[in-house]
Image (spheres, grey):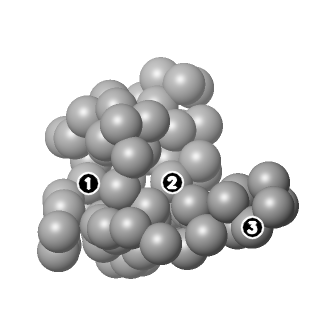
């Protein structure tokens, strides 16, 4: 039963699409790692992520490099 809750928690709920708009070169290492954590590492890539407070925090950290496409 716990396994069902974990699986449904990851797939259910709202998602957010994020697109990388600027390069990660000449940025702090932690900002580059955050982009990789968001599944972005090249300009123009779009990632669909589960909308959680942790994800929103990561987006806020690199807000100058990405844009939210859809909510």
Q: Residue at 44% across / 62% down in the picture?
A: 50
Q: Secondary structure at mark 3?
A: helix
**Farthest residue, direction front:** 1
Give the image location of residue 12, x and y in percent: 47, 72
Query: Which is nearer the N-term, disc 1 or disc 2?
Result: 2
Residue beneath label 1, please? Answer: 66
Q: Is residue 53 visible?
A: yes
Residue beneath label 2, please? Answer: 38
Q: How many marks?
A: 3
Q: Secondary structure at mark 2?
A: loop
Is residue 31 shown left or right of residue 21? right
Give the image location of residue 23, x and y in percent: 37, 53
Give the image location of residue 46, x and y in percent: 38, 76
Query: Which is nearer the N-term, disc 2 or disc 3?
Result: 3
Q: Is residue 47 visible?
A: no
Q: Nearer the viewer, residue 65 or 52?
A: 52
Q: Which mark is residue 20?
A: none
- What is the crowding at mark 3: few (fewer than 14 residues within 10 Å), some, or many (at least 20)? few
Separation of disc 1 and disc 2 at Cα? 10 Å
Q: Residue at 22% across / 41% down in the picture?
A: 63
Q: Are marks 1 and 2 in contact (CB under 8 Å)?
A: yes
Give the position of the N terminus as an image quadrant.
bottom right
Nearer mark to the viewer, of 1 and 2: 2
Residue beneath label 3, please? Answer: 4
32 is higher (above) or lower (below) than 43? above
């Amino acid at each position: 039963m716990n396994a069902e809750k974990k699986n449904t928690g990851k797939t259910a709920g709202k998602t957010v699409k994020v697109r990388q708009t600027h390069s990660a070169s000449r940025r702090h290492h932690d900002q580059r790692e955050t982009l990789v954590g968001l599944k972005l590492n090249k300009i123009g890539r779009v990632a669909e992520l589960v909308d959680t407070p942790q994800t929103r925090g990561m987006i806020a950290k690199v807000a100058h490099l990405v844009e939210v496409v859809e909510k």
